[in-house]
Image: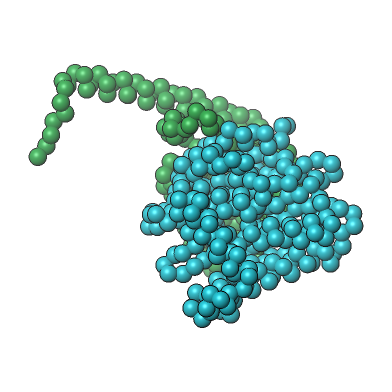
Amino acid sequence: MKQFQSLMGMPITVEVVDPSVTGADIEKVFAYFRTVDDTFSMYKEHSEMSKVNRGELGEEEYSHAMKTVLALSEQTKQETQGYFDIQHNGTADPSGIVKGWAILQAAHMLKEAGFTNFYIDAGGDIQVSGKKGGNPWRIGIRNPFNRKEHVKVLAVTDKGIATSGTAIRGQHIYDPHHPQTPLLDIVSLTVIGPNVYEADRFATAAFAMGKKGIYFVEQLPGFEGYMIDASAQATFTSGFERYVLKA
Amino acid sequence: MLTLPSGNWSETLDSLFVVRTFMRKKAIISIVIIGTFVLYSLIHSHSSPAAVVPITSAGSRSSSSSATTPSSNEPPNATVTPSSFYKDGSYTGSVADAQWGVVQVKAVIQHGKITDVQFLQYPNDRSRSIDINSIADPQLTSEAIQAQSANVDIVTGATDSSDAFIQSLTDALSQAHA
């Protein structure tokens, strides 16, 4: 069973292929994403995130989810030499970590409900679990120059995949060390990691590093990456090809 | 104060000549590669309007596979500007300079909404990308991207590219204003 909703400003798709699944099981996942949006939205005046940024809450009043996300953001900043930083112009925007974290929490919910073969895709960041029809899930990396095409097909199971890039609504990632310099060299960086939270946060940080981002991914144990630059050349890490579906 | 290069001029001229010869070789190689792609495109897709863009034209029409994945569709709220401003039709944007080449897009408007944005040109100048490849780590591999025809369950990816894209699209949309 496969269902689609547009939430948090992005398309979210959930497919569970275990035969016991019901619509109510999948609706729980969407309900969870709505809760996350209500808590962390930068655009909702009454979200906890907005209250935190206006200084209306003491730290002891933060929800458990808020404390977790802020701690994970700080940890990621440390692990990426400051390239991942939720602070910008005096405002904390943890969107870059909330998405991957929420997809992973939702995947845990499905696992706890007894499902093993599924995926959750939120705006192109994906957690896959198990298989579809006995085969690994097949994931296409979109051609950043032609969104109707994919330039690689990956065969993966029990992994997280995330892509950072320039988007139709404009640049949404910048280099915190040089915030005024636009990132133009790289148009798409896909990371495969142990789960979508890990893949997403390192894809975001590596994208902000520009051309050296792929070397950052290369030295992360358990991660592989595929980078497409503005000249339509791709560069990939040494273990990437093991995930590429052979035609 | 102008500083003259040390060393003698004939040496400098010699090395310039070597560089120029190398560049000419690169140019010939590029022409051969591009020519091959154009020929290939002409043979394999007569209908393509963008035969000089190898990946777009020679690339399989994989829309059938991506159409089955909802994630490849734009979310309803992702249109660039309110839809009612645009007249139906196809509008070709200006050629915008990206760092490694040019970008030109065509926007298709149906029922006042952007239904498709196609790349007519994007950077694919092989002779320039040689410079980029030369800095690659020996452990890492580089390749020109190439469209794949296999069906997929899910799609990951950045949607569209760069300031040059936005510049060309903005120009196309300015023509579409009612």
Instruction: Give the percent coordinates (x, y) of residue B139.
Output: 53, 30
| B174 relative to B22 in the view: left or right | right
Task: State whether residue B152 appears in this view.
Answer: no
- Quadrant location, the N terminus of chain A: bottom right
Identify whether B19 is placed above or below B122: above
Instruction: Give the percent coordinates (x, y) of residue B96.
Output: 44, 49
Identify whether B100 is placed above or below A60: above
Q: Residue at x 68, y 52 (%)?
A: A126
- Quadrant location, the C terminus of chain A: top right
**Among all residues in the image, which is located at the extreme left?**
B1
Q: Which chain is cyan?
A: A
Q: Which chain is green?
A: B
Colour convention of the picture: by chain
Q: Residue at x 70, y 52 (%)?
A: A127
| In front of the other: A44 or B106 | A44
| In front of the other: B49 or A223 | A223
Q: Residue at x 45, y 50 (%)?
A: A81
**Among all residues in the image, which is located at the extreme right?**
A20
Q: Quadrant of residue B120?
A: top right
Instruction: Give the percent coordinates (x, y) of residue B13.
Output: 22, 21
| A133 relative to B43 in the view: left or right | right
